[in-house]
């Protein structure tokens, strides 16, 4: 250790005051860098990360708002395709269904109609059940014609039976739903 102290003293004597001041300034700058700059850089990196997250959240919120607006416009466009609701619209649909059955020479005994609840989306649904008698191809043609002429009427279910093998006529129980724009 004495040898190391001897070299240190020798260097101090040879260095002079200007070199000693410069070494002291370098050591001070290094300490300042470790004490102030590095923690500040870490805090800055954290703040930049929070800023990026806030920007991403804002972008998602704007995209969500734009998505909601586009969705509402799409729903409004879809609702515009449905005819306006009410008793007159239902009556007109029933007349068209009856005309399609008459054109196919089908007999409709007695139909039942029921108002389905408005789901809160501006759509009214009417369910109606029709017992139909006639030839099987005529029944299929009737269903196709109703779906073609009344796109807002959907076939929910169909039950078809025949009394015997020799019978050409079938009895079909057809259940439809008609959708209309709510008058409210």
Image (spheres, rainbow, N blue to C red):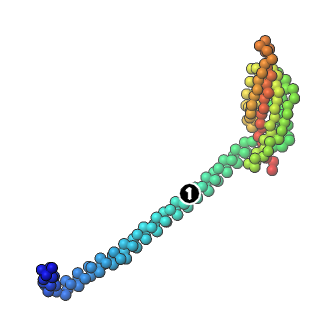
Across and down, in percent, residue 51 comes to 49, 66
Q: Is mark 1 on a helix, strand or loop?
A: helix
Image-based side of 90 in relation to 66, left or right: right
- Residue 102 in view (yes/no): no
Image quarter for residue 147?
top right
| Quadrant holding the N terminus | bottom left
Q: Mark 1 points at which residue?
A: 60
Which residue: 85% across, 23% down? 107
Which residue: 14% across, 86% down? 13
Image-based side of 125 in relation to 43, left or right: right
In the depicted structure, whether residue 4 falls above or below residue 48: below
Q: How crowded is mark 1: few (under 14 residues within 10 Å), some or many (20 or more)?
A: few
Which residue is nearer to you in this view: 138 or 92?
A: 138
Which residue is nearer to you in this view: 170 or 9?
A: 9
Q: Residue furthest front?
A: 1
Image quarter for residue 34?
bottom left
Image-based side of 122 in relation to 35, left or right: right
Image-based side of 177 in relation to 55, left or right: right
Across and down, in percent, residue 8 comes to 16, 82
């Amino acid at each position: 250790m004495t040898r190391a102290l001897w070299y240190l003293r020798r260097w101090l004597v040879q260095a002079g005051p200007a070199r000693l001041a410069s070494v002291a300034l370098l050591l001070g700058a290094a300490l300042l860098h470790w004490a102030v700059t590095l923690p500040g850089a870490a805090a800055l990196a954290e703040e930049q990360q929070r800023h990026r997250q806030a920007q991403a959240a804002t972008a998602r919120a704007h995209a969500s708002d734009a998505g909601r607006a586009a969705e509402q416009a799409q729903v409004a466009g879809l609702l515009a395709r449905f005819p306006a609701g009410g008793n007159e619209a239902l009556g007109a649909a029933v007349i068209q269904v009856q005309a399609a059955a008459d054109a196919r020479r089908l007999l409709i005994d007695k139909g039942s109609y029921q108002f389905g609840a408005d789901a809160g989306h501006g759509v009214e649904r009417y369910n109606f059940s029709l017992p139909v008698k006639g030839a099987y191809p005529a029944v299929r043609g009737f269903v196709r014609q109703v779906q073609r002429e009344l796109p807002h009427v959907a076939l929910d279910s169909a039950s078809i039976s025949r009394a015997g093998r020799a019978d050409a006529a079938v009895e079909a129980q057809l259940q439809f739903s008609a959708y209309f724009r709510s008058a409210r």
